[in-house]
Image (cartoon, rainbow, N blue to C red):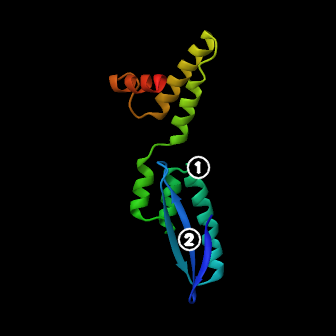
Amino acid sequence: MAGIGKIKNRYRVRYRLYYPDGTYRDRSRQVDKKGQARELKAQCDILESKTRLQEYTVNVIDNWWRNGLINAKDRKDLQLYPDGRKTQAADEYWDTRDVCKKEREARETRLLHIMECLVPIPVSTPCGIQMVNGLRHG
């Protein structure tokens, strides 16, 4: 959670930026007035929670960059990672294999449709087939 501290005549807001690989970086911004610090803290609380839960989009990242909450390197690093929640959900969905044959076939079909939407590589290519098989057997 973001925090506000006073340094001489200015206020510093400290917050963390979480990456999908589990790492994080501490960041801070300074402002002159306490009201500005409170507004910045509210934005930083949202940034922290969204990056920790991986609930951000490219538009949200651009908005944080325009508001000065993240720098260009952070912007680039956050855009490199795929949405881990979606692939994790597919893995968990596939891991529940103790179902009947009909349900298992239905899940395979659903996963193929999901992977076609999420993966930029067409599933019909050898690389795409290998990726889907890795998801199934991983």
Number of other residues with Cα within 10 Å of mark 1, as a class: few under 14, some 14 to 19, many 20 or more: some
Residue at point 43% right, 22% down? Answer: 133
Residue at point 33% right, 22% down? Answer: 126
Q: Is residue 119 above or below residue 77?
A: above
> Of 130 and 24, which appears nearest the observer?
24
- The N terminus sits in image quarter: bottom right
Residue at point 54% right, 36% down? Answer: 88
Q: Is residue 119 above or below residue 17?
A: above
The x, y position of residue 77, in whole percent, is: 41, 54
> Of 19 and 120, which appears nearest the observer?
19
The x, y position of residue 20, in whole percent, is: 49, 48
The x, y position of residue 63, in whole percent, is: 52, 61
Q: Is residue 1 left or right of residue 87?
A: right
Determine the secondary structure under disc 2: strand
The residue wearing badge 1 is: 53
Q: Is residue 76 above or below residue 136?
A: below
Residue 77 image label: none
Determine the secondary structure under disc 1: helix
Q: Residue furthest top?
A: 101
Residue at point 62% right, 71% down? Answer: 3
Residue 14 image label: 2
Q: Is residue 19 left or right of residue 122?
A: right
The x, y position of residue 111, in whole percent, is: 53, 24
Which quarter of the figure has residue 10? bottom right
Residue type indicated by callout 2:
Arg
Residue type indicated by callout 1:
Leu
Q: Is residue 73 left or right of residue 97?
A: left
